[in-house]
């Protein structure tokens, strides 16, 4: 069965929050944002704005009926500024008018007087000023000092990785509708319906059961709608609560880019020690995370950075330190990979510098040190059923990588010995292995619920906490349910994600949407099947385990009973058999002790290897990614076509992060790349010209539903390989300082500096 969403998208029939019918007698909210990055508010004048025709009312911090607080992990983020502003784009006032045009006009009449202060934009500066979101954390394994002291080679350097705009196709938006008894219904573009429910309840001064959040689908999220959707939902809810009429809050693209957080930029110092043969002995690193002006999810992002400090490799002695630094840019937030890409980028840079000083080729260092089953991660968990080496070796064999690399190496050697004759066009390659832990590292989030209703005509309704945002989670759950009940997927309908039907949902994030919600749905199906089989066992005078369902028919001991699915359901209904079930799934065997920074935070790990080839125009600094070949560990894929799209899309998004997507700010903290015209996104011409993906075979995973493995985030990390392929093609051998993204402008300057 083709994913129904695919048809809707292609035909233009898909409906998002802003496509909902909105009454003419409804309010539109537009926010007035701080023009400055840091300072004390001396005066806020909204008097002229109130007089604009069509304006219903304007809210400031003092008008909020509940708490003026939207912080998640740490309560340090205001919905509306009170005495000071901490980033350019911070909400200061919310205008509610009967037309969006009137609201925007009124925003232009608001005047604010701010005693401007010098903003802090660099995380290292924030660290030196002790501007920290939370206490510094360190993960340790073995004895780093001893490991470094015994090393033959010690590579040191610095790595910088930049921010990244989510640029979801559908912007942030919520439509809030009031109902009787002061209740609120919110149609929200959020990955985390329960987070929105909780935050709106707090700001509006309501109990959570008074707030219903409904999500049909998102037009992309990538983490940007995990917690940051709360802000805009609160504005819509406040308007509906005060006015008693529906309220629409949908951000324009420019406002979305200006006021929302990005992927966290990192600045890091590393030391990698190795023996004469290239075995890693010790790794020491400190990460300076640019959290932005408030915590958001920064502490959790930083934690995952520490979990992935050694990337896909085993290092017996590790000391990884991380600091979440408060600066004056919008609070940075979740983004695909959630801190792991930043860590992996640092380690891959360290390997390149180790190769330069030791003379041992990069690929030898990588292969020699890939993590194996039984090796211990820095957080104390032993690798289980590790497939890093399998993926690496399969990539070498399947794509004949040794031959491909030899051609490029021979050309480079010839150029090196050509008496200074340097070709205008250089070619380079890089391999990028990945190892990514799957589970929420906040242990209590690893739970999900599902409701299954079998109707008397044999059709099935499914409600879970998973949010569909283009990743195909609904269709995967549809296939899980259909396969379990032995019916066609066409019979199964996935309902919208709703906090009334399924309460206390975990965000659809951490690549765990199918793992958690699919497992819960499967459990509910098994409960219904057991009831049906026990009902039939009474009639056949046998044990219920004799029965099975497939091809929409009932079988006993592999023989058809002559009873179709619809007849079975109707007979069960007439005999008052319960045809609905609710199931709760929690990932087993997870634990982590933050007092010692040790435990088992992940259900399993996903592995893979990507190979990249790049060509650089050394005169202009431009480049193309010629080839991207991947072997990826998916376990036993539930839907290979959906998973293929995730691998390809994630990899291209990762390439964009390390090559062209650059967020820039003025010295005053104002964003310089906060429009679609100034922020460069990868497009179809930016994708690798030759892209191939092979899934690892015979790779059943007994720690996830149907033997599968999560696919959302891991492929993003492949993109890091494109950075190092470009560096090789440019002839940039020194990796003691690596800075991403390597935009054509930055590469041009590097090439000129090396002339």
Image (cartoon, rainbow, N blue to C red):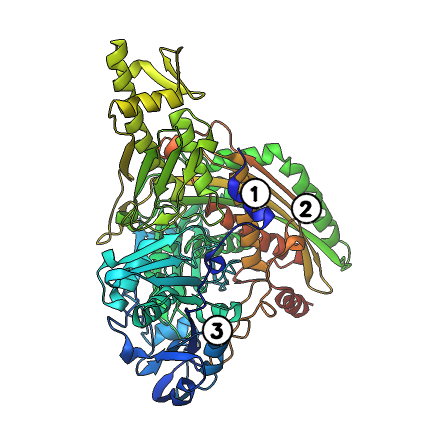
Q: Nearer the viewer, residue 191 or 349?
A: 191
Give the quadrant of residue 200: bottom left
**Residue 675 in the image: x percent, y percent?**
56, 70
Q: CA distance from mark 2 to mark 1?
A: 46 Å
273 and 436: which is toward the camera: 436
Instruction: List x then y, in percent, for residue 216.
Output: 42, 50
To which residue does mark 3 refer? 100
- Label 2 residue SS: helix
Provide residue 391's location: percent of width, then percent of height.
51, 36
For residue 409, the mark is 2
The circle on residue 70 is none
Above/below status of 41 relative to 488: below
Q: Residue at x 41, y 65 (%)?
A: 332
Residue topped by disc 1: 7
In this picture, residue 610 sits left or right of residue 493: right
Which marked residue is nearer to the observer: mark 1 or mark 3? 3
Element under label 3? helix
Q: Residue at x 45, y 62 (%)?
A: 22
Q: Is residue 591 left or right of residue 368?
A: left
């Amino acid at each position: 069965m083709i994913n129904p969403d695919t048809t809707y998208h292609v035909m233009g029939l898909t409906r998002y929050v802003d496509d909902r019918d909105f009454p003419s007698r409804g309010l539109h909210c537009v926010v007035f944002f701080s023009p400055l990055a840091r300072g004390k508010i001396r005066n806020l004048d909204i008097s002229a704005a109130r007089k604009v025709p069509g304006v219903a009312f304007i809210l400031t911090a003092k008008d909020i009926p509940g708490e003026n607080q939207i912080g998640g992990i740490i309560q340090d983020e205001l919905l509306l500024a009170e005495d000071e502003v901490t980033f350019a784009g911070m909400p200061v006032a919310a205008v509610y008018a009967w037309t969006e045009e009137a609201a925007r006009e009124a925003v232009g009449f608001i005047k604010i007087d701010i005693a401007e202060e010098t903003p802090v934009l660099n995380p290292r500066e924030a660290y030196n000023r002790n501007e920290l979101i939370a206490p510094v954390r360190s993960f340790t394994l073995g004895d780093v000092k001893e490991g470094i002291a015994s090393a033959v080679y010690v590579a040191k350097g610095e790595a910088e990785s930049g921010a990244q705009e989510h640029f979801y196709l559908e912007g942030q938006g919520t439509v809030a509708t009031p109902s009787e008894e002061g209740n609120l219904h919110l149609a929200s573009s959020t990955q985390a319906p329960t987070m929105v429910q909780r935050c709106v309840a707090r700001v509006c001064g309501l109990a959570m059961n008074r707030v219903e959040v409904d999500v049909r689908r998102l037009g992309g999220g990538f983490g940007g709608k995990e917690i940051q959707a709360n802000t805009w939902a609160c504005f819509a809810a406040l308007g509906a609560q005060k006015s008693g009429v529906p309220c629409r809050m949908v951000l324009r693209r420019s406002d979305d880019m200006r006021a929302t957080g990005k992927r966290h930029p990192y600045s890091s110092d590393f030391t990698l020690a190795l023996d004469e043969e290239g075995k890693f002995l010790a790794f020491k690193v400190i990460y300076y995370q640019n959290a932005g002006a408030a915590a958001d999810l920064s502490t959790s992002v930083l934690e995952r950075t520490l979990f992935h400090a050694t990337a896909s490799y085993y290092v017996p002695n590790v000391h990884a330190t991380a600091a979440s630094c408060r600066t004056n840019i919008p609070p940075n937030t979740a983004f695909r990979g959630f801190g792991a890409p930043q860590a992996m980028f640092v380690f891959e840079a360290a390997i390149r510098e180790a190769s330069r000083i030791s003379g041992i080729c990069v690929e030898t260092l990588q292969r020699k040190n890939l993590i194996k089953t039984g090796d211990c991660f820095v957080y104390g968990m032993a690798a289980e059923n590790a497939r890093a080496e399998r993926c690496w070796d399969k990539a070498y064999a399947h794509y004949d990588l040794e031959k491909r690399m030899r051609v490029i190496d021979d050309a480079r050697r010839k150029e090196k010995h050509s008496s200074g004759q340097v070709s205008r066009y250089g070619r380079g390659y890089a391999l990028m292995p990945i190892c990514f832990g799957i589970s929420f590292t906040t242990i209590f989030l690893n739970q999900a619920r599902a409701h299954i209703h079998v109707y008397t005509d044999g059709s099935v309704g499914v409600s879970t906490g998973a949010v569909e945002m283009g990743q195909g989670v609904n269709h995967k759950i549809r296939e899980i349910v259909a396969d379990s009940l032995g019916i066609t997927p066409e019979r199964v309908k996935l309902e919208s994600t709703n906090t009334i039907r399924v309460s206390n949902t975990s965000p659809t994030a951490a690549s765990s949407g199918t793992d958690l919600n699919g497992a819960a749905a499967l459990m509910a199906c098994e409960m219904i099947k057991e009831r049906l089989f026990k009902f039939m066992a009474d009639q056949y005078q046998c044990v219920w385990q004799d029965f099975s369902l497939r091809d929409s028919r009932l079988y006993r001991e592999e023989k058809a009973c002559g009873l179709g699915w619809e007849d079975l359901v109707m007979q069960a209904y007439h005999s008052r058999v319960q045809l609905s079930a609710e199931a709760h799934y929690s990932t087993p065997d997870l634990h982590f002790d933050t007092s010692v920074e040790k435990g088992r935070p992940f259900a399993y790990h996903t592995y893979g290897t990507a190979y990249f080839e790049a060509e650089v125009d050394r005169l202009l600094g431009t480049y193309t990614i010629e080839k991207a070949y991947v072997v990826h560990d998916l376990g036993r894929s539930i839907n290979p076509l959906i998973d293929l799209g995730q691998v390809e899309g994630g990899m291209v998004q990762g390439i964009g992060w390390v090559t062209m997507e650059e967020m820039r700010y003025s010295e005053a903290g104002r964003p310089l790349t906060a429009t679609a015209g100034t922020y460069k996104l990868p497009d179809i011409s930016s994708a690798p010209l030759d892209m191939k993906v092979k899934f690892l075979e015979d790779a059943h995973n007994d720690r996830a539903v149907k033997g599968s493995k999560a696919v959302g985030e891991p492929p993003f990390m492949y993109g890091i390989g494109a950075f190092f392929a470009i560096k090789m093609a440019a002839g940039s051998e020194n990796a003691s300082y690596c800075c991403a993204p390597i935009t054509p402008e930055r590469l041009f300057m590097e090439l000129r500096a090396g002339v």
